[in-house]
Amino acid sequence: MHIDRDRLISDLETLASFSDGTPPGISRLVFAGGDQQARVWLKSQCRDAGLTVREDAVGNMFARWVGAQPQLPAIGTGSHIDAIPHSGKYDGTVGVLGGLEAIRALQQSGFTPQRSIELLLFTSEEPTRFGLGCLGSRMLSGGLKGDADARLKDSGGSTLAELRAAAGFQGSLDQVRLQDGYYAAFVELHIEQGPLLEKEGLPVGIVTSIAAPAALRIAIEGEGGHAGGVLMPDRKDAFCAAAEIVLAVEECARATGAIDTCGTIGKCHIFPGAVNSIPSRVEMDADIRDTDEQRRNRVLGEIEQACARVAAKRNLQVKVSPINADAPATCSPRIIEAMVEAAAENGLAYKKMVSRAYHDSLFMARIAPTGMVFIPCRGGVSHRPDEYSAPQEIENGVKVLAATLAKLSSLES
Ligand code: GLV
Ligand code: MN
Ligand code: MN
């Protein structure tokens, strides 16, 4: 089987050109200009490959290579193309374009799938716009209902209903959930987003489980006022409270003593945001994850307690609202086995590993046996403009993906 590496790298570059960000950073906010342009281009690439394209009400795209036995549950593969602000070219895109290239390589090799093979583009894996990650896959697996249409809003106050309609996606969100048994298997190719494969000189990671992500919205209500007029003993500065809470999040995550516990506050809005005005209100989102769900939940509880302590000490209001607290996922032993064989057949060494990042696979695992293939990325860097995987590494990942899809699409699988 021949992977057309040059075509794939050129596709990745083309996709990177659809960006709302300032180069070298990439940004593709779901339903905004770059995302919309990328979707149009991707659909035409899929149609050129002879795939049948459909989209659902939230904008998940399905491009199907119809198998010899189209009545059988299909094999899914894919990832996301939305990109957080100031990020790189490879997160998610390698899984989408690598999936397309795997299909094209299988087609060109003369292979006939028994089960259909379907490429997916999931809407908004990143939480940038709506505060909640894995929107599309969450809905496909029944983890989010139609009320999300009015409940989920972006920072400008536009609802999911308004934004998806403006992007051309109509219909009830209640129809997005896939019926049971729609997929016989799902496999996602992704960059590792961590340093282990590179450090160990290994070309392939075979994921055994995906860590449990959670997010909290923390809203602090203090008292604003003149930066010169209100004396220090009289203040209820919401941002000073926020600073204590940020450090408490770090401390709570570190205090488990487990390397797998992570706590981050990467988003913070200060109101009114003037240099000579005491912050009256702060809103921040905290991201808490762990491979151990119970330990993650304990940390969430400790953060809530820390917030209550800061509120009492500073005599202001702190409201903590859960955004999501998702269970971890376990990959399917049968798919792991297929990936092990696929790596061996291609002469590629591998290690089995945990994914600390979350992926659409976290939700696909709720409705189908699921597996993930990782490839190294330079320095383990991701969610940054200097994110990079070499063409050879991407090709290796596509080889393993294509061989895995071929095995899973055979009748016996
Ligand atoms: C996915 O982008 C994650 O934050 O793990
Ligand atoms: Mn990401
Ligand atoms: Mn990703």
Image (spheres, helix red, strand yellow):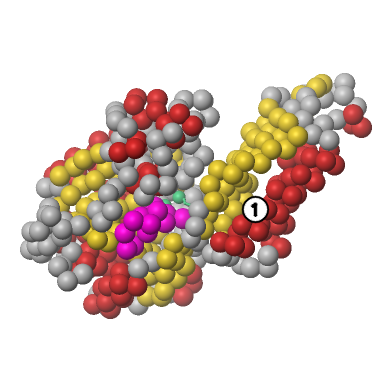
Q: Is residue 262 left or right of residue 228?
A: left
Residue 390 visible in the picture:
no
Q: Quadrant of residue 408 in the image?
A: bottom left
Amino acid type, residue under disc 1 in the picture: Leu
Residue ID at (19%, 42%): 53
Classed neighbour count for the residue bearing mark 1: other residues with Cα under 10 Å, few (<14), some (14–19), many (≥20): many
Q: Percent position (x, y) of residue 354? A: 47, 67
- Looking at the image, residue 139 lies above or below residue 219: below
Q: What are the residue bounds of the magenta stretch?
A: 358-370
Of the pair 316 and 403, the residue shown nearer to us:
316
Q: Main secondary structure of the magenta part?
A: loop
Q: Is residue 223 left or right of residue 400?
A: right
Which residue is pictured at 24% across the width and 53% down the height? Answer: 182
Q: Position of residue 244 (x, y in %)?
A: 77, 45
Is 152 part of what is drawn in magenta?
no
The percent position of residue 385, horizontal first and vertical second, equals 47, 48
In the image, what residue occupies the spot 24% across and 46% down? Answer: 62
Compared to 153, does 4 lie above or below?
A: below
Q: Quadrant of the C terminus?
A: bottom left
Residue 318 or residue 197, whichever sits in front: 318
Query: Residue 373 falls in which quadrant of the image?
Result: bottom left
Per the image, label 1 sits on a secondary structure element best described as helix
> Which residue is at a point 35% across and 68% down the rendered structure image?
332
Q: Give the number of callouts.
A: 1
Asked if residue 315 can be seen in this view, the reply is: yes
